[in-house]
Structures are given as structure tokens and as C-alpha cells.
Image: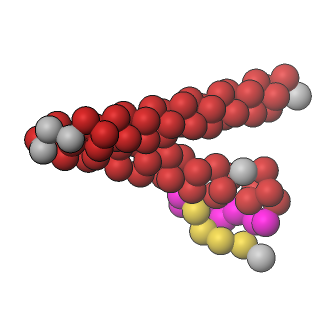
Amino acid sequence: MEWGFGGRRVGVGVVAEGGIMGFLDKVKNRAEQFKGQAKEAVGKDGRDNRMQAEGRVDRLKGSVKQAGEHLKDAAKDLRRGSK
């Protein structure tokens, strides 16, 4: 089974390596960051400290997950370069 992705054809093996799944994880992490930013803004405007704190936590969780994805990508690049 093959899909077109980014102008190239990829097979199921790429999905198993994290190609499409890694991309989807990055999208989810960015969405979590934006959700946190929105909660923070709403909490700040409404002077709701709890909402603002929840937003900060969501934003930071998304940022940490995103950093983990970047580290995984860097490790994959190093492995590919050393072959």
C-alpha cells in the first residue's frame, strides 16, 4: 500500500518508521501549544488565574513534546548519516 506524501510516494514501511505518524504527532503538539495559548489569553482577559495556569501547562506540555519530536528526528538523521 502506498500514499503520496510531500510530492513523493511512501510505503507502509515509512509509516512504521514514524514518517506520517511523526508528522501527525508534531501537528498534535502544535495544536496543544495553540490551545494553551488560547486558554492563557482567555484567562488573562477574564482575570481567571486557574484558566491562565491551565493554558500555561497545556502550552508547556506541547512545547516539551515538540522538543522530543525534534530530538527523535535528529537521532534518525544521525543514524542515517552514519550508515
Q: Is residue 45 left or right of residue 25?
A: left
> Residue 36 is drawn in which quadrant?
top left
Vertical arrangement, residue 40 with respect to residue 78, above or below: below
Colour scheme used in the picture?
secondary structure
Outermost residue toward the right in this view: 83
State the image coordinates of residue 32 (x, y, percent, origin top left): 43, 48
In depth, the one of 24 and 12 nearer the eye is 24
**Residue at (69% x, 33% y) in the render:** 72
Which residue is at 70% across, 62% downward?
10
| Residue reaching furthest to the left | 45
Quadrant of the rendered image containing residue 83: top right
Q: Is residue 9 magenta?
A: yes
Q: Is residue 42 left or right of residue 32?
A: left
Q: Is residue 70 left or right of residue 38?
A: right
Q: Position of residue 49 (x, y in %)?
A: 25, 35
**Residue 19: x and y, percent?**
68, 52
**Residue 45 counted in the magenta span:** no
- In-front residue for pair 23/2: 23
Q: Quadrant of the N terminus?
A: bottom right
Residue that lies at the very extreme toward the bottom in this rendered image: 1
Lateral position of residue 11 relative to residue 53, left or right: right
Residue at (50, 37) in percent of width and height: 61
Q: From this viewpoint, is residue 11 visible?
A: yes
Q: Position of residue 14 (x, y in %)?
A: 76, 56
Query: Which segment did they paint magenta?
Result: 6-12
Q: For this rendering, which residue is in front, 48 or 30?
A: 48
